């Protein structure tokens, strides 16, 4: 009996390695003749899908890796080029739906943030339809504009979906802690390399620059907050996060000192973390800032550090002119806007003068997320977006009262990131990239900010689940 089993087992087990080896050789042959990053990316995606179907909790890590380190770009026949994160988000939605079917339960995140976010996304579609119906016949309409507008709306939708997915994937505090440390490990190493002489060696291997301002803010805020609050961190992790924080500070004040967005974002995040962690220093900080401001030292020093008059001439003044043109054209329909990504067509119908330059057919980008949103979705959509962001902040402040350790650090980090994003939006399309400007390449990084903000909803639902479970146990004991 044993001999019979030993004869059949090797044949069955040998077939799988043979099939795998043959498949690898065939793929190597075809890729060698016709190398394609699309095929490689598809194969990696299929492999990741099989893993995630078995372990859905790893889904956030897939989006993190896709956003940071999968440099795949696919053209669309327009100026829009899609990156790996743009494919990862819908793929993860499909996997989430398949997992829900398998469990016969649809886990939808419960939060006050969901309604305004859903309405904001619906407003994007409404603005697109109204903008198309009311299009000025005197303004040439590009033939591919509808595709570009849908791509702009996809940036809105995929950002919101990443927020919801993180909220829905949430299992327990330990899970969120592992996801956060996983991000800090990947993003921290890339940030440290980016700040080192080895930077040119990894440039082509990355999907987005680690020096991308929102990523610097996210990485720095999470690293600082966990150093301040997470007492379970080992000594090795503390040294690592300290090194990551040093790399972020170096990039901000040395490597990218002329990037006002980076300076403002990191300083805003650091200020919020300091304010929340050291309440006894609040008045001292306020008095110190006021004293420097009244002395006439603070603002001139900050102005010169950020580049001074030369930086203003090269970038600052022109941005105000561009934003003014976008606002001027959007006043055609300020309530619902011109529609996603439509303002460029309107803004180029007349020349744009600036100082000694005269731009005959300007390709306008506002370089301001608030102005972009006003033009994309009007005052109605902008109001819904502000409502959503206010609900996110309210959630963060409520969580402060009932969390400790890692969870409190995570909550404070997200409040710091929230503040930084609200400020940085005035200096560029960092949070919801304009498809004609930063676009999908920047979405690779901005989507991770949305992902981790969704972790606040996950924390809230974890706490409610524990409370319900404790109440049920107490009822059962009685």
Image (tube, grey):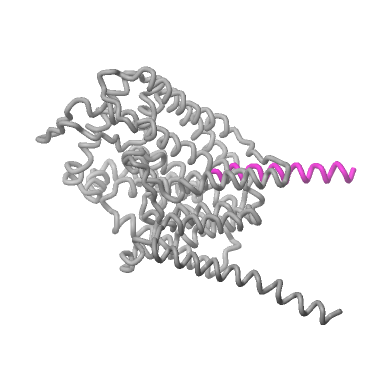
Residue most extreme to the left: 356
Residue 88 relative to residue 106: left or right: left
* Residue situated in front as seen by the camera: 424 or 41: 41
Q: Residue at x 49, y 44 (%)?
A: 450
Using the rendered image of the protein, determine whether residue 229 is visible from the camera's viewpoint. no
Q: Report the front residue among 148 and 396.
A: 148
At 75% across and 75% down in the image, what residue appears?
9
Q: Quadrant of the C terminus?
A: top right
For the residue pair 82 and 305, the one nearer the viewer reads as 82
Residue displayed at 17% across by 41% down: 313
Figure check: 366 above or below 28: above
Is 283 left, or right, of 114 in this rendering? Answer: left
* Residue 91 visible, this angle: yes
Instruction: Say which quadrant the N terminus sits in.
Output: bottom right
Judged by its main secondary structure, the magenta piece is helix
Count the numbered circles shown.
0
Whether residue 473 appears in magenta in the rendering, the answer is: yes
At a point 40% along the width and 56% down the height, the residue shown is: 71
Residue 248 sits in which quadrant? bottom left
Q: The magenta stretch spans which residues?
A: 454-478
Note whether 59 is above or below 358 in the view shown.
Answer: below
User: x%, y% of residue 363?
Assistant: 24, 35
Lateral position of residue 279 relative to residue 271, left or right: right
Give coordinates of residue 35: x percent, y percent: 39, 61
Q: Is residue 441 above or below residue 150?
A: below
Residue 168: percent from left, percent from top: 62, 43
Tell me where residue 28 appears, x and y as whole percent: 46, 67
- Front residue of 31/88: it is 31
Question: Is 411 inside the magenta-drawn segment?
Answer: no
């Amino acid at each position: 009996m044993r001999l019979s089993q030993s004869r059949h087992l090797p044949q069955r087990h040998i077939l799988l390695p043979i099939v795998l080896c043959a498949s690898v050789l065939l793929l190597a042959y075809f890729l060698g003749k016709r190398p394609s990053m699309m095929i490689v990316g598809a194969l990696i995606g299929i492999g990741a899908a099989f893993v995630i179907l078995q372990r859905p909790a790893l889904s956030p890590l897939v989006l993190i890796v896709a956003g940071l380190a999968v440099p795949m770009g696919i053209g669309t026949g327009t100026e829009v080029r899609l990156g790996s994160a743009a494919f990862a988000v819908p793929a993860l939605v499909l996997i989430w739906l398949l997992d829900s079917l398998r469990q016969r339960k649809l886990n939808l995140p419960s939060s006050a943030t969901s309604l305004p976010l859903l309405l904001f996304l619906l407003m994007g579609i409404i603005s697109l339809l109204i903008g198309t119906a009311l299009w000025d016949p005197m303004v040439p309409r590009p033939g591919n504009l509808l595709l570009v507008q849908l791509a702009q709306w996809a940036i809105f939708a995929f950002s919101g979906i990443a927020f919801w997915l993180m909220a829905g994937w949430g299992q327990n505090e330990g899970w969120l802690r592992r996801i956060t440390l996983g991000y800090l490990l990947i993003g921290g190493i890339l940030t440290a390399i980016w700040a080192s002489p080895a930077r040119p060696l990894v440039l082509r291997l990355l999907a987005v620059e680690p020096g991308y301002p929102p990523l610097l803010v996210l990485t720095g805020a999470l690293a600082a907050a966990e150093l301040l609050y997470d007492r379970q961190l080992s000594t090795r992790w503390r040294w690592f996060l300290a090194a990551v924080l040093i790399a972020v500070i170096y990039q901000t004040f040395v490597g990218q000192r002329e990037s006002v967005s980076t300076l403002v974002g990191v300083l805003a995040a650091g200020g919020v973390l300091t304010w929340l962690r050291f309440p006894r220093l609040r008045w001292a900080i306020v008095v110190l800032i006021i004293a420097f401001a009244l002395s006439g030292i603070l603002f001139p020093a900050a102005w010169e550090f950020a580049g001074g008059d030369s930086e203003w001439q090269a970038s600052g003044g022109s941005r105000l002119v561009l934003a003014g043109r976008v606002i001027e054209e959007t006043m055609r329909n300020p309530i619902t806007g011109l529609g996603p990504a439509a303002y460029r067509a309107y803004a180029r119908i007349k020349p744009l003068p600036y100082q000694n330059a005269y731009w005959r057919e300007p390709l306008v980008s506002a370089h301001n997320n608030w102005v972009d949103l006003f033009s994309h979705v009007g005052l109605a959509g902008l109001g819904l977006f502000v409502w959503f962001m206010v609900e996110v902040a309210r959630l963060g402040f409520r969580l402060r009262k009932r969390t400790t350790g890692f969870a409190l650090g995570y909550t404070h980090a997200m409040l710091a990131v929230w503040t930084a994003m609200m400020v940085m939006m005035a200096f560029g399309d960092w949070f919801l990239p304009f498809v004609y400007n930063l676009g999908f390449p920047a979405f690779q990084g901005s989507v991770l900010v949305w992902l981790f903000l969704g972790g606040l909803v996950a924390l809230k639902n974890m706490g409610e689940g524990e409370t319900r479970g404790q109440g049920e146990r107490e009822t059962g004991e009685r």
